[in-house]
Amino acid sequence: MDFNWQLFAQYLVIGIATGSLIALIALGYTLVYGIIELINFAHGEVFMMGAFFAATVVGLTGVTATSGTASVVLAGIAGLFGAMAFSAAINFGIDRIAYRRLRSAPRLAPLIAAIGFSFILQNIAIYWKGANPISPPSFLPPEIYTNVLTEWFGLSTTIFLTVLDVVVVGVTIPLLIGLSWFVYRTRLGKAMRATAQDREAAALMGIDINRAIGVAFLLGGALAGAAGMIALYYDNSARFQMGFRYGLFAFTAAVLGGIGNLAGAVIGGLTIGIIWAMSDGFMKEYISGWGAQWTPSVIFAVLVLVMVFRPSGLLGERTADKV
Amino acid sequence: MDATLAASGQALRARDQRSERRRRQMKFWGVALLFFLYPFVDQALGIDRLGSWISIMIFVLLAMGLNIVVGYAGLLDLGYAAFFAIGAYANALLTSPGSFFVREGYIPEPLQHFWPAMAISWVVAAIFGVLLGAPTLRLRGDYLAIVTLGFGEIVPNFFLNAVSITNGPKGINPIAKPTTIPLPFGHELSFGATDQRNWYWLILVVGVFSVLLINRLYDSRLGRAWQAVREDEIAAASMGVNLVRTKLWAFALGASFSGFAGSIFASAFQFIDPSKFEFTISIMLLSMVILGGLGNIYGVIIGGLLLQFFDRILAEELNGPLHWIGDQTGIGFLQDHDVSQDRLLVFGLALVVMMLVRPGGLFPSARRKAEMQPEEEDVRVQETQQLYDIRQQNEPAVGERA
């Protein structure tokens, strides 16, 4: 059978859009792990709460698809920033309530507390919006699904690249640039990197360690919130359980890229996004009986294989002695 | 003179220890007897909760198995539900007329009964414990936890998708029940759908047997090796403990108890499908172990009973009173609140609160307690100074005062 380039390109497009979403979540895992070596298990739920809050904010603006382009864009921005602030606050709050008190406890204690928080947040989400999937308030005009390739560039192709795909990537890239600017160009970012390298030495140099760690949680939470808003409209639904799968896929991405490594998280995110899309749609062309239902097995298998055979990830781990 | 004194002192101490052990045994069998008599109380008072107790005890049995891996050997397993699923599916695939293997005639007739199937599920679960445990041996702490979580997701996903073998989301039914056991004086123990009492006793017997077995294991050479590995792998290895073998035995034996629990679960409820073995189950079991006290089997049993009692009985019974209070006070939230919606919150809170307030659990094991709060100041200082990892909570971390 000939290789189906058309189909491959189509799922590549979907994979890149999903992948940038996963990269945003993965960065939260990597920021926190890089600085305190904690797998923040509640991170997926922080993302889910961001999606729920985004739905609330967009609903409150009362903007609909017919309100005009300016209102739609403003409502989108309100939802995005609202979700970012909300998720950042939750992530920071969890650190303040629990993780900070467990800084010097045995290593597994904060991980178990994080698992506990992930369940608590899921339950809060059930109280908030119920146990069934919600669909977000629709404010995006139908033009969001027009094909950029045919309508804007006049190409004759069957590959579908929607405006929404472009927006997703277009929101992600500035966030990534902003993050790396913060981490590599500001004083606080420098404090974070110093704390990650050697907590005690950083404290001796006069760095407020808890502040540096808190900032890592804030940043990670904000990125998760942005991902929540994006996922809400990309999937067009949200559910209290959505954080589990997205969270673990993103964690896989972070490990794949080398946990603690910011660029690695982005590359890992794109890789996982593409694997996800290919397994969902492309593989069944070649393997009979394949379908989206096997995707979790594939990605968890990637997770297990990377952890067992190359725990430092593709790009290598920044810090030593993690495993 | 001194020698005689010392000798009599030793004899006294030995007698104390003996009577202490006897007291503990009396307590154990006393509690077991109370559990044995419960079905009569249930019937006499018309409580009608035996069905719930059957599943409560199955989950307590699972928590005991998980305690071997997490509590004794110190390997945080976040995918224990996978072994539960393997135990249950092993039994179902061996005995159900709807099973692929039975239909194709791969299973010889004598094996298609409950008892041999339970024995086989026990072995199958242990084998999978080794298979899934082996890749994690090189990993430490949190990485090991995540790999076990990965397996815990892959196994039910496989059962869900391998439709031709497992019937996928539709599940498997019916599943063989234990054959009727004849008793003297014309009585018999049958295991039909209405014989809940016999089911209850069956699980109780398996549970008591498991407690005795696990207690013997804990005091055995292997049990001591587990604790040594949990405390300090390098020290244990240099004392001649074979790390690989010790950890694999923990995975195998820990998983094997879920083989029992899984096959009884499948047979008692006559229906299994992949949704019964989700991640939530693994975490619920972990909460039970942590709430009760890592490494202390009686603590784990109590923790398990508490959480399961909430999950299976209290959650239903509380609704009525809550709605009544809601109606009286006009609080809308209480009027139509369903307490079974709170289960995730309860498991999560159990984990968080225990970690913050009482990391040893409600009933910490004696040895763990000694490790957490050494009596001698020297030991404490030593423990806290060594590594980042094992510094104790009462020692302020660098920068914490800021």
Image (cartoon, helix red, strand yellow):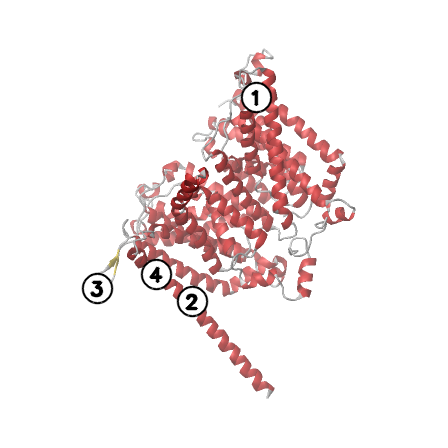
Q: Judge by depth and name the residue closer to the eye, A13 or A128.
A: A128
Q: Chain of mark 3?
A: B
In terms of sequence position, does the residue under pointer 2 or pointer 3 come before the other? Answer: 2
Mark whose residue sits in front, 1 or 4:
4
Q: Judge by depth and name the residue closer to the eye, B11 or A104.
A: A104
Which residue is the site of mark 1?
A: A164
Labels 4 and 2 positioned on one and the same chain: yes
Instruction: Classify mark 4: helix, strand or loop.
Output: helix
Q: Amino acid at mark 2?
A: Lys
Mark whose residue sits in front, 3 or 4:
4
Instruction: Classify mark 1: helix, strand or loop.
Output: helix
Labels 3 and 1 positioned on one and the same chain: no
Which residue is the site of mark 3?
A: B185
- What is the distance, in whole Å, between disc 4 and disc 2 at their CAs? 14 Å
Q: Which mark is residue B27?
A: 2
Q: Amino acid at mark 3?
A: Phe
Mark whose residue sits in front, 2 or 1:
2
The answer to whether residue B159 is visible is: no
Q: Amino acid at mark 4?
A: Phe
- What is the distance, in whole Å, between disc 3 and disc 4 at their CAs? 21 Å
Q: Chain of mark 2?
A: B
Q: Which mark is residue B36?
A: 4
Q: Residue furthest left?
A: B186
Measuring from the top left, give residue A143's x and y in whole percent.
54, 15
Q: Amino acid at mark 1?
A: Leu
Q: Is residue B204 above or below residue B284?
A: below
Q: Chain of mark 1?
A: A
Q: Chain of mark 4?
A: B
